[in-house]
Amino acid sequence: MSAALEVRGLTTQFSTRKGAVTAVNDVSFLVQPGRILGLVGESGSGKSVTGFSIMGLIDEPGKITAGQVMVQGTDMRGMSLEEQRKMRGRAVSMVFQDPMMTLNPVLRVGDQMAMAVRVHDKVSKAAAWDRAREALEIVGIPAAVERLQAYPHQLSGGMRQRVAIATALLHRPAVIIADEPTTALDVSIQGQILAEVRRLADETGTAIVWVTHDLAVVSSLADDIAVMYAGRIVESGTAAEVIANPRHPYTRGLIDSVPGLHEPGQDLPQIPGSTPQLANLPSGCPFRPRCPRATDICATIPPNTGTEAHAVLCHHPLEAT
Amino acid sequence: MLSYFITRIAQAIVVVFAMSVIVFVGVFAIGNPIDVMIDPGATQAIREKLIAQYGLDQPLVVQYWTFLRNVFAGDLGTSMVYNIPVVDLVFSRFPATLELVAVSVLIAVGVGIPAGLWAGYRPDSIGAKLVMALSVLGFSVPTFWIGMLLIMGFAVELGWLPSGGRGDEATFLGVSSSLFTPDGWSHVIMPAINLSLFKMGLMIRLTRAGMVEAMGTDYVKFARAQGLPDRQIVFSHILRNISIPIVTVLGLELGSTLAFAVVTESVFNWPGVGKLIIDSILQLDRPVMVSYLIMVVILFVLINLVVDLVYARLDPRVRLKGGA
Amino acid sequence: MPEIIAENIAAVPSAPPVETRAERLRNFWSDFRESWVAVGALIVIGVLLFLSFGAPLVSPQDPYDMAMLDWLDAFLRPGTEGSGGYVHLLGTDNAGRDMLSAIFYGLRTSFVIGLSAGALALLVGIAVGLTAAYFGGRIEALLMRIVDLQLSMPAILLALVLVAMLGQGIVQIILALVVAQYAYFARTTHGAAKVERGKDYIEAARSTPLPTHRVLFKHLLPNVLPPLIVVATVQVASAIALEATLSFLGVGLPLTEPSLGSLISNGFKYIHSDRYWLSIYPGLALMLTVVAINLVGDQVRKVLDPRNSR
């Protein structure tokens, strides 16, 4: 059986006045049905652009320049624009960060969801509303019929995000890209949504790519983790393995700076320096200027020095334990 | 909320009153209308009799007081040129202006909004740039000059359309209008296009700006992520959102359309209120000038008031700030 | 830790980054140059300014000098030689006036009116806007309500009323235009000054014993200037267009003092005979002027818009 989503050598560039900037650089990963991949990185690491690239929603001046996006074994990049559009919402779907902004403020929730149903399935309006109600019930929204009649501003942030997730689920897609969907929510609501998403992945078999900067969230939610830095995936493996046994110095630094994953009573260490600008990256390993282990050889792009199951792009990886 | 309403309405009344004084005093500072009215050979006695008849020998304050009392009685005076009550005069001209304004708004909306949507959908395309260039022309080139070009092209050179005036009227459902006859349409189409150009430019810019902004929003990206085709996103999602400011501006623009009708009606010799006011200014027909101006002031104050009050209802933050 | 010190220094409230005046001009020009349409428009304006203010030097005839006009030269077609012994490139009008000369002189009147009305309206507007923004409270409420009311009325209507009250003539027209247009500047000044006022550096300047006028002119004004420049270009163009419209309607300037508007108005009478040159050429000159100024203004707005800086 083919993977729900397989990304191979994906590269996305933006043309600017100063030349092409590579936001996503030779990114490859694989998500099996029902599994959750945590795509972790700081802002500007290219993780969101990766999400939009998978959806085929990169606008000018951006362009996917290389790679393949295989959804259930078929390459989306080989399709016409119209075929790609028909894949969106049906095979791959997306949920955004800010639930306050993702719903159209002047349309009723039900109308928006029914539109999403009817764009792929030729059913009556009433049937579409019925499908929308079912979807709301699946994500645990009480009194779904009334919610459908509501306008977005009449719902709370958490409720709106559930509506967005329900909308993404309408056609039971193979893959959902979730772009920091809990970042804008209260911590308690965040917990509920995470539990809901975990349950949905298990029950529906939908593969989820969970894009986030929050390592604490993915460590409890994801099955696998891929860490992005300056457009590349620098470390990837199962969540348990990467968290317990990080081998890239950057991943190590990230884990050390998360309060929950750290021993209490000590100062939180921070990674020195700041995220590099994609427009002027250092040559070789982009983490080199901030890395305590950097040597001369780091001026060349590092190969995978780990295993296939736990890949690391580093000349001097930390010891495997 | 109620106190805000009362403050705003009180302010509006003060403004109307103040403007009426300014207009009255201002207009009465111009020349002597009697000289225009009568034959230069008339005797001094006839002159003085006429001056007394129109109350022009009274002090300004008394004249204003008389005027104000008459206004409240629904009497805006009698035109010195046409010798009929101003109210009747203005109302007899009003339907013509209304026809012109209605057709021009239809044209502005019917052309401006689709053009703006298109220009905003592909802002970097050649076509979009062309549309924007045309909207700059609509904004900046004086109305009367475009009107003149239209006449030269379509009336004088090509002879397709009449160069001015209003066409035959017909009565339909008890309403008499020139829009019910083909002749009427052949007369109204050119002045209406002329009057619509400024608003069309405005509509294009407004729609384009709204479209460009909407294309970058999350709700549009979300709709695209659901696989909705762009056409449906534009018509079902975006248009609903940007129609709110567009309708607001159209409402506010109603007043300025009446004002621009002054120019268009003069160029096309259209027998509306705008032509009336220009003629009355040129002929020093004071009662008509004063009445028209005060009616316009009231109209503008009313439009402003309605917009303010509607916004206060929609946006609680305005209410909290109070009646500034 | 020198880095932290440097960061703290950067955090001290200060006016936006200081560039020397020459640098700012150079940057402005290099951004402006990016649109060849705007550069072309600027050149057109330069040429028109030269032709209009140099009218006595470049035009073949003084159209004001009745002694030089010959009735026999009336309605000559463009390109015909008249009794003066030279070719009337754009023909002559009903009084035998050389249209080319009349357009140059008319352009001069239009520029004089547009520029002086624009400049005066700018000054009045700045004064009103700064007063409102600086003092706040009741003064602000009153001034801005008047400004808002005026803005809701179209300038053409206001100018029409004022000209009707003040009578005809250049000074009266300029006055009417100033009253009709100052509100745009007042609104812009007030808006920009309010934003600047909220910033820390103005608060800092206010808390020092600097006199009011120094805060206003040294600190506030330079920062509200960019949006004002944009409004000013647009308003000069619209002053020229307004004057032409008023003259066309017959309430502006008489034909003895020809502006472009009165020339067009005069030509309009002959629109049904085929004497198109009486109205077309002054109209083209007017359109060229107004559109060129607007195109330049558009580009200036794009360049000065902080959202466009990359």
Image (tube, coloured by chain):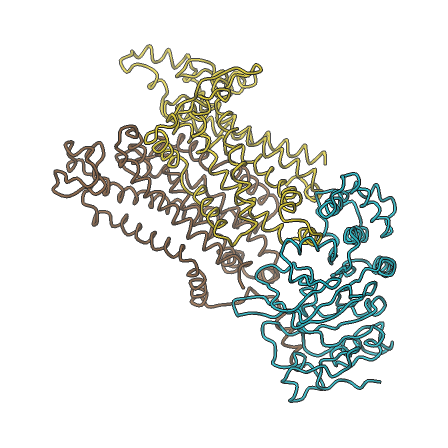
Colour yellow, chain: B
Among all residues in the image, which is located at the extreme front?
A: A1
Q: Is residue B83 left or right of residue A145?
A: left
Relative to C29, residue B24 above or below: above
Q: Is residue B3 left or right of residue B63?
A: right
Residue C11 % position (x, y): 63, 69
Q: Is residue A178 left or right of residue B21?
A: right
The colour applied to the residues of chain C in this rendering is brown
Q: Specify the quadrant that holds the N terminus of chain C.
A: bottom right
Colour cyan, chain: A
Numbered marks: total? 0
Relative to A245, residue C233 above or below: above
Residue A8 % position (x, y): 69, 70
Residue B3 found in image quarter: top right
Q: Specify the quadrant that holds the C terminus of chain C.
A: bottom right
**Residue at the location (67% across, 89% down)?**
A295
Residue C237 % position (x, y): 40, 45
> Of B93 and B186, which appears nearest the observer?
B186
> Of B110 and B282, which appears nearest the observer?
B110
Residue C87 % position (x, y): 16, 43
Among all residues in the image, which is located at the extreme bottom?
A: A296
Residue A44 found in image quarter: bottom right
> Of A313 and A148, which appears nearest the observer?
A313
